[in-house]
Amino acid sequence: MMDSFSLALLFLVFMLNNVDGKLINDVNNLGLSGCDLFKGNWVYDDDYPLYNSSVCPFIEKQFDCLRNGRPDGDYLKYRWQPNGCNLPRFNATDFQLKLKGKRMMFVGDSLSLDQWQSLTCMLHAADPQAKHISQRNGATSFFTFPKYNTSYLVFRDVFLIDIFKDNNGTRVLELDSLSAAAQWNEMDVLVFNTWHWWFHTGRKQPWGFVQDGKCTYKDATRLILYEKALNTWAKWVDTEVDTTKTKIFFQGVSPDHDNCVGATKPSESTHGSHPGEIVLEKVLRGMNKSVYLLNVTKLSQYRLDGHPSVYGFGGHKSMDCTHWCVAGVADTWNVLLSAILDQI
């Protein structure tokens, strides 16, 4: 077995000879003196939130907690503080100029929509007089700023892989098919996400059968299906994407909580590693191309208070401990995204 020095030397040689960089979580340390941006704690900050959500006229009801009547506001005042360094404050003008003439797309489920809504509000609030154009075409929503020639899109694709109807009208999850990728090819920055729909069962289960190569079966352990789907996506990135031109991120797994009613401050502890994040990191480490993990899982696990709770889409008739209020936790995801984009 290698000692720690030998392992460190081997890793150094690997990095020097792999200019593409692969994923790995070493992106956390880029240009920040070895600081891991995703390890730290939430601190109360009177300078937060980064913007007033009331001046963002296009927040969807499910994320608009203040307009839906949430009475407390301390959940808006917490800032993520990495251990050993300071996370650069978000500068909307710099962000727009950095992406001038480019297109960024979020691909995934409603957690991708959550992050996209947060980012568009952050950009709009910083320059509310700037003209913006918002439109939707099928599964894709567009938000553009002509002043900067920037476009921010969100594409709803909850599994990333395909679901099709067979001759009997039965929906089939096709583990090795990724036809939607044609929608992503022309983007400059892609931010992917998939997790929450993998565990829907019963009437909410979106498929009747699973197609796995030449094998068809009714169902399987969901973590196994999730990993197979991620490997299909990873193969597409490795074989089809020029990552010197297109920057690829994976949002990580956004955690939900069993009960978030009445929570007004971050939790003091979390419950170990998230199984979905473990599988995701395993897949990313096996890739050949550069994919940057926006590792929001652990830092978001602390934010029991950040969910809409009964102040989401369903009002007091239902509880939402999956999505995040806007403004709120997803703003920090975008601050981290911006910090990494500054370094790559």
Image: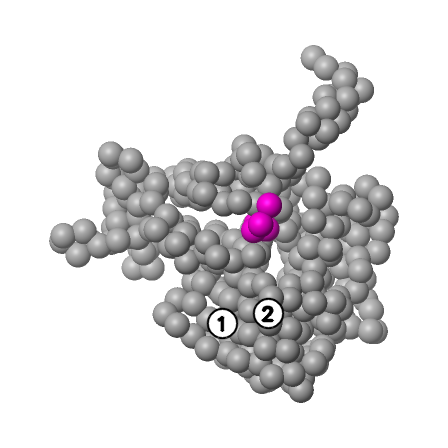
Q: Do the residues labelled 2 and 1 touch (CB within 8 Å)?
A: no
Residue 250's x, y, as percent? 56, 50
Specify whether residue 191 is in view: no
- Badge 2: how crowded within 10 Å, few (<14), some, or many (20+)? some
Specify whether residue 48 is in view: yes
Label 2 vs label 1: CA separation?
Answer: 10 Å
**Disc number lying in front (2 or 1):** 2
Q: Nearer the viewer, residue 260 or 41?
A: 41
Position of residue 74 in the picture relative to residue 178 (left or right): right
Residue farthest along the top direction in this orientation? 1
* Amino acid tagged 2: Thr
Residue 86's x, y, as percent? 84, 56
Residue 79 on the magenta segment: no
Position of residue 170 in the picture relative to residue 123 (left or right): left
Secondary structure category for the residue under label 2: strand
The magenta-colored residue range is 244-249
Residue 81's x, y, as percent? 80, 57
Residue visible at 83% across and 73% down in the picture:
46
Q: Identify the residue position indicated by label 2 in the image.
A: 150
Quarter assignment of residue 65:
bottom right
Q: Earlier in the sequence, mark 2 or mark 1?
A: 1
How has the structure been colored for display? Answer: one colour
Residue 236's x, y, as percent? 44, 42
Q: Identify the residue position indicated by label 1 in the image.
A: 142
Which quadrant is home to the N terminus? Answer: top right
* Amino acid tagged 1: Phe
Q: In this view, does 315 lie above or below 252?
A: below
Q: Is residue 79 above or below residue 240?
A: below
Position of residue 231 in the picture relative to residue 305 (left or right): left
Q: Is residue 184 above or below residue 46?
A: above
Q: Which of 58 and 319 is in front in this view?
A: 58
